[in-house]
């Protein structure tokens, strides 16, 4: 997997002051490989998934496709649940972002589907400054899991992060590529 | 550390022989006296850390990398390092309030003598519930307030010492010390606000305080205009005195930014509130002020520069913020005024009366000469300034800690469309970093003059203490749960979204019959939303401490009165002795008083400290998203936690299985999520079934409003079928059946006294 560590995220508030930075996942297929390796992944949807357009679709549409492709459990934070229900999808769990991070810290937690701790946690749409704080918590206090920030603003405290993608078109292409690859590499 | 000599000193300081109540187990508690209480709280509500930095850089052994279980050269680990930072930040907050109180009290003692009586009016007999509970002294004079501040100072030095390298090394003990700092902070808040109420004659024993004008557009800049900035109104009040003495009151505009504006409008309702901290830089860059006066706390550090740029005079009045200016306190006023006017010199003046004279005389002289500098940017001028922006580099966006779309807003302004910039203004906290980054040097904050609506609003001026008679009226329904909760919106204006979200939250709660209190910048922000009839929440709701009412208690130091109200419920309604009885009172609040503090726009160390102090009292805190940058929360394991308490009546341990209060400090992501979280944080184990049914009714209705369904954790809070609100009975019963709900015990005297080692006997909880 060709990747470099995160140097500068989009937001300066999230600049890392430290020694352990995310690996940047430049190629969506590498991100798919990370997801494919996970035994019990969780996908955390933040409030921006229901308010952020990516081209002519909402961010949640892409996130749902990623989750469905591998039947990844979904945690709806903030007030995302309402929109998900309108879209006909029931989230596996409903916590606010800090609460789910708090539970993820605990290796003994049963996880949202009762299968034990989650070994990979994907994040999309969480307010960037708040997401970075939560990722810092998991980096330091949850050695039993990996985090993957699927966010075009990029997150150095994650284990894996999408590179900064300023242009929305590039972001859409990244998401579509990831979804396409997930479809093409679906395990039997 | 206690000794016989110190114990004797304490007895003398608190006049232990005064018969108003027997002295409880912890008069003037030291770092260790409440440690067991703290550790008991922390066993249920574990610290949650979100490190800002992988390293420790405090001493010359470092930098030390603390990632992946590494320890620093001194042996500190990541959790303890975070907790140490929290303690340091809490100490900053305590110091700010404590020094404020010390200055206020010394000033008033100098003016009136130490025997000056503290009289809070006919409606307030329990004059200082925090000081009574913590120290064990009944406050009768300014001297007693000084005793309170001296106690804070004495404890403070031990806490600061603990932060040194090679001192405290355990995160729970750091947290216990942070609690101690928070408790001291509340003592300082109460001492400071009572001093200024008594010394300056602020409103007390009256609920219906005047409605005052608020908004940056409210300033009549055709008059000489003075703007006071900060939190210590000694000089601002002296300016009002000078204006009155010279028949200038009403002829000179006096407006305030931040808490000084609260306190100067408590002194003179003709003064105006320009707005919260978030609008400080924006307003000062308009040039509408002829003279800018700074006192202390939350004052921008580049005010001298901004004043110079706009041709305004500037006088600093606090030894905490001297700006490198000449201290002219001893020089004749005539000389100072001449140099201000002729040489545009800026001064530090620590004599409030002299500062007031200089400020007013300078304003009178400057105003006629500055009319050209008091013109706001027109849309055409703003569009011309913004025209260079192509909206593509996004350097402004990237540096914005509010994550605002500044680039698009400026680009559109350059094309003559100011709608988006107006929206950005309402979410902007005015740091000005976007301007620093702009490669075209576009003055973005100045552009906002053309975009910001000049709406004006009404805010009720701060009313100070909650009345004893109000406590008698609401004590029972609060404890039984039939008034669903007491909520305080406190703190700063570092909001995650629109500035009027506080008003939305306050109104959602008031219409559900919560007692809603506001203070500080949150109280100002809550005024910045009008209904269809043009009324703010202060015009719509009754200003009493009662169900469905909305109260502005005042500035940041007035936060003490809401904590004080919770103590008074235990003391006046439940008749528990509060004298030096910290654990007993806090246990009562934790288990029986459905109170919750909210800091929706947290930024300062003061707000962190106030919140940390509230947690030690048993009051949960809900923070806005920026609160995650405080790096520490207190969270339970919810249904996975141990919720065993003592039944005070049977003296048996009972597993309640009920996570209430659910967390003691938690961040929420959106205002919608905040609403349901606040409601939930007002649940208490002591709620009677009818009371719990009312609280659940609020919870379910709010949850349905923002989430569209029944709450996913409803089963955690329904104890018996009598708790189920009638309106939702059918669907709740069906839901509970679906999730396999089991009944839980309902206690009429839940307490955690007896579940840890304490000097407080369990019998003390029964009255």
Image (cartoon, grey):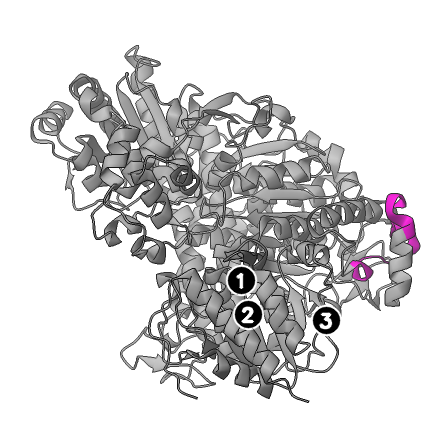
Mark 1 surroundings: few (<14), some (14-19) or many (≥20) residues within 10 A? many
| Quarter-of-image position of residue A188 | bottom right
Point 62% across, 57% down: residue: A78
Point 20% across, 47% down: residue: B441
Mark 3 surroundings: few (<14), some (14-19) or many (≥20) residues within 10 A? some
Subunit ID for the residue under disc 1: A
Foreground residue, A19 or A86? A86
Q: What residue does disc 3 label?
A: B641
Q: What residue does disc 2 label?
A: A123
Q: CA distance from mark 2 to mark 1?
A: 7 Å
- Reply above or below: A162 against B86: below
Relative placement, left or right, of B76 versus A84 is left
As drawn, the residue found furthest toward the top would be B247
Point 55% across, 63% down: residue: B633
Relative placement, left or right, of B303 versus B564 is left
Q: What residue span does the magenta drawing correspond to?
A: B714-730
Relative placement, left or right, of B172 versus B285 is right
Mark 2, secondary structure of its residue: strand
Q: Are marks 2 and 1 in contact (CB under 8 Å)?
A: yes
């Amino acid at each position: 997997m060709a990747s470099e560590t995160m140097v500068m995220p989009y937001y300066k508030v999230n600049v890392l002051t430290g020694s352990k930075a995310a690996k940047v996942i430049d190629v969506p297929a590498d991100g798919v490989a990370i997801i494919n390796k996970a035994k019990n992944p969780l996908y955390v949807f933040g409030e921006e998934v229901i308010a952020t357009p990516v081209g002519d679709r909402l961010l949640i549409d892409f996130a749902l496709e990623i989750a469905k492709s591998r039947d990844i459990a979904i945690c709806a934070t903030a007030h995302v649940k309402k929109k998900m229900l309108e879209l006909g999808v029931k989230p596996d769990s409903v916590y606010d972002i800090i609460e789910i991070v708090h539970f993820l810290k605990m290796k003994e937690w049963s996880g949202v589907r009762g299968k034990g701790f989650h070994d990979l946690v994907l994040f999309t749409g969480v307010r960037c400054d708040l997401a970075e704080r939560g990722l810092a918590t998991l980096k330091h206090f949850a050695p039993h899991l990996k985090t993957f920030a699927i966010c075009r603003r990029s997150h150095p405290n994650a284990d894996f992060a999408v590179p900064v993608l300023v242009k929305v078109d590039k972001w859409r292409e990244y998401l579509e590529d990831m979804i396409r690859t997930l479809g093409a590499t679906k395990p039997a | 550390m206690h000794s016989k000599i110190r114990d004797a000193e304490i007895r003398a300081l608190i006049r232990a022989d005064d018969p108003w109540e027997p002295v409880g187990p912890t008069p003037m508690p030291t770092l260790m006296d409440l440690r067991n209480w703290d550790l008991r709280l922390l066993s249920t509500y574990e610290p949650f850390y979100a490190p800002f930095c992988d390293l420790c850089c405090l001493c010359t052994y470092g930098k030390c990398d603390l990632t992946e279980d590494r320890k620093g050269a001194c042996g500190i680990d990541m959790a303890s390092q975070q907790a140490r930072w929290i303690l340091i930040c809490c100490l900053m907050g305590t110091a700010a309030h404590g020094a404020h109180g010390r200055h206020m009290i010394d000033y008033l003692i100098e003016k009136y003598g130490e025997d000056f009586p503290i009289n809070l009016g006919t409606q307030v007999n329990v004059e200082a519930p925090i000081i009574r509970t913590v120290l064990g002294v009944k406050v009768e004079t300014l001297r007693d307030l000084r005793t309170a501040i001296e106690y804070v100072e004495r404890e403070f030095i031990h806490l600061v010492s603990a932060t040194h390298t090679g001192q405290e090394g355990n995160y729970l003990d750091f947290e216990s010390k942070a609690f101690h700092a928070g408790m001291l902070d509340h003592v300082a808040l109460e001492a400071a606000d009572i001093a200024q109420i008594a010394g300056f004659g602020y409103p007390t024993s009256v609920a219906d305080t005047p409605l005052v004008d608020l908004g940056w557009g409210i300033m009549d800049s055709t008059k000489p205009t003075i703007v006071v900035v900060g939190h210590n109104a000694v000089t601002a009040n002296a300016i009002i005195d000078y204006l009155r003495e010279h028949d200038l009151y009403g002829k000179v505009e006096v407006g305030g930014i931040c808490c000084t504006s609260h306190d100067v409008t408590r002194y003179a309702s003709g003064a105006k509130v320009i707005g919260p901290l978030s609008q400080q830089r924006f307003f000062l860059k308009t040039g509408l002020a002829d003279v800018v006066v700074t006192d202390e706390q939350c004052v921008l550090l580049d005010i001298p520069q901004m004043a110079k740029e706009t041709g305004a005079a500037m006088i600093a009045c606090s030894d905490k913020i001297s700006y490198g200016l000449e201290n002219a306190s001893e020089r004749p006023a005539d000389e100072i005024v001449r140099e201000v006017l002729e040489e545009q010199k800026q001064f530090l003046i620590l004599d409030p009366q002299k500062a007031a004279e200089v400020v007013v005389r300078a304003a009178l002289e400057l105003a006629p000469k500055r009319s050209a500098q008091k013109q706001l940017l027109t849309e055409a001028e703003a569009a011309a300034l913004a025209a260079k922006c192509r909206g593509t580099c996004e350097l402004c966006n990237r540096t914005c800690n509010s994550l605002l779309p500044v680039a698009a807003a400026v680009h559109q302004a350059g094309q003559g469309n100011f709608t988006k910039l107006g929206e950005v203004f309402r979410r902007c906290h005015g740091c000005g970093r976007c301007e620093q980054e702009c490669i075209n040097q576009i003055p973005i904050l100045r552009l906002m003059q053309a975009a910001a609506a000049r709406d004006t609003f009404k805010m009720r001026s701060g009313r100070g203490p909650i009345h004893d008679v109000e406590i008698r009226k609401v004590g029972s329904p609060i404890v039984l749960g039939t008034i669903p909760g007491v909520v305080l919106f406190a703190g700063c204006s570092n909001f995650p979204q629109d500035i009027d979200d506080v008003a939305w939250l306050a109104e959602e709660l008031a219409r559900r019959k919560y007692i809603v209190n506001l203070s500080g910048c949150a109280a100002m922000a809550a005024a910045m939303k009008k209904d269809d009839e043009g009324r703010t929440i202060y015009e719509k709701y009754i200003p009493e401490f009662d169900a469905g009412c909305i109260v502005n208690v005042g500035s940041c130091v007035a936060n003490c009165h809401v904590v004080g109200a919770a103590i008074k419920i235990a003391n006046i309604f439940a008749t528990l002795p509060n004298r030096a009885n910290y654990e007993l009172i806090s246990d009562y609040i934790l288990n029986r008083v459905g109170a919750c503090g909210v800091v929706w726009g947290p930024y300062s160390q003061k707000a962190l400290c106030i919140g940390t102090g509230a947690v030690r009292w048993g009051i949960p805190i809900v923070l806005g998203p920026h609160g995650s940058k405080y790096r520490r929360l207190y969270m339970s394991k919810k249904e996975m936690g141990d919720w065993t308490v003592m039944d005070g009546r049977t003296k048996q341990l009972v597993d309640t299985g009920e996570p209430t209060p659910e967390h003691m400090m938690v961040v929420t992501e959106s205002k919608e999520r905040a609403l349901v979280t606040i409601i939930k944080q007002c649940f208490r184990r002591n709620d009677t079934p009818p009371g719990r049914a009312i609280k659940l009714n609020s919870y379910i209705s709010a949850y349905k409003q923002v989430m569209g369904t029944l709450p996913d954790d409803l089963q955690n809070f329904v104890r018996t079928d009598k708790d189920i609100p009638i309106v939702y009975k059918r669907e709740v019963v069906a839901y509970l059946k679906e999730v396999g709900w089991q009944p839980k015990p309902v206690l009429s005297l839940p307490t955690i006294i007896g579940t840890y080692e304490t000097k407080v006997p369990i019998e003390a909880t029964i009255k």
